[in-house]
Image: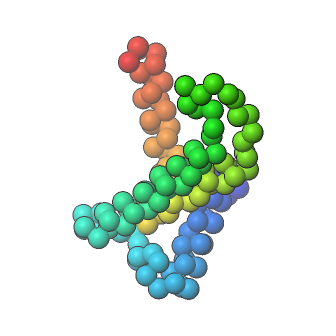
Amino acid sequence: MKNCKLKIMFDKRLDFINDMKENIPGAYPDFPLDMSKKESQQVCRDLALKGVEEMFEALQHLKNWKPHRQTEMPEIDKDEFLEEIVDAFNYFFAMLIVTGFNESDLFDAFLVKHNVIKERLKNGY
């Protein structure tokens, strides 16, 4: 998995987190977090909400979603849209990292869930 793009993304986020910890005290807690503690759950909540906020920023670039809109607005800054999605992923990756998960854990969980939803689709869920 040496050249796996997902691993590269996790490694780069971990490198950034470590830089933040070194340069801005208190920016990130020591990890992995003890998820039974209130402070740890607050860190996760904050990271998740920051990721959701970035997703909302991405959605601001979409102009044709309103069903009542009569005029089309075909212009979209796809680069800005993608940049906001990347920002969101960075917060979600950070949340996984500080809670002790890595790219393999995410990939394995993805496959399990993928199989579950494929079965649901097949069985008329």
- Decide if residue 8 is in sight here: yes
- Decide if residue 7 is in sight here: no
Residue 92 x, y percent position in the rendering? 49, 56
Relative side of 17 to 125, left or right = right
Relative side of 92 to 30, left or right = right
Q: Quadrant of residue 124?
A: top left
Q: Residue at x 43, y 66 (%)?
A: 98
Where 50 falls versus 29 (above or below)?
above
Q: Residue at x 39, y 69 (%)?
A: 32
Viewer-nearest residue: 28 or 7 = 28
Name the colour scheme: rainbow
Number of numbered discs: 0
Q: Residue at x 48, y 24 (%)?
A: 118
Q: Residue at x 41, y 14 (%)?
A: 123
Q: Quadrant of residue 34?
A: bottom left
Q: In what quadrant of the picture does the C terminus appear?
A: top left
- Seen from this angle, which residue lies furthest front? 70
Where 74 falls versus 46 (above or below)?
above
Relative side of 99 to 66, left or right = left
Residue 1 x, y percent position in the rendering? 64, 53
Residue 76 x, y percent position in the rendering? 72, 42
Residue 33 x, y percent position in the rendering? 35, 69
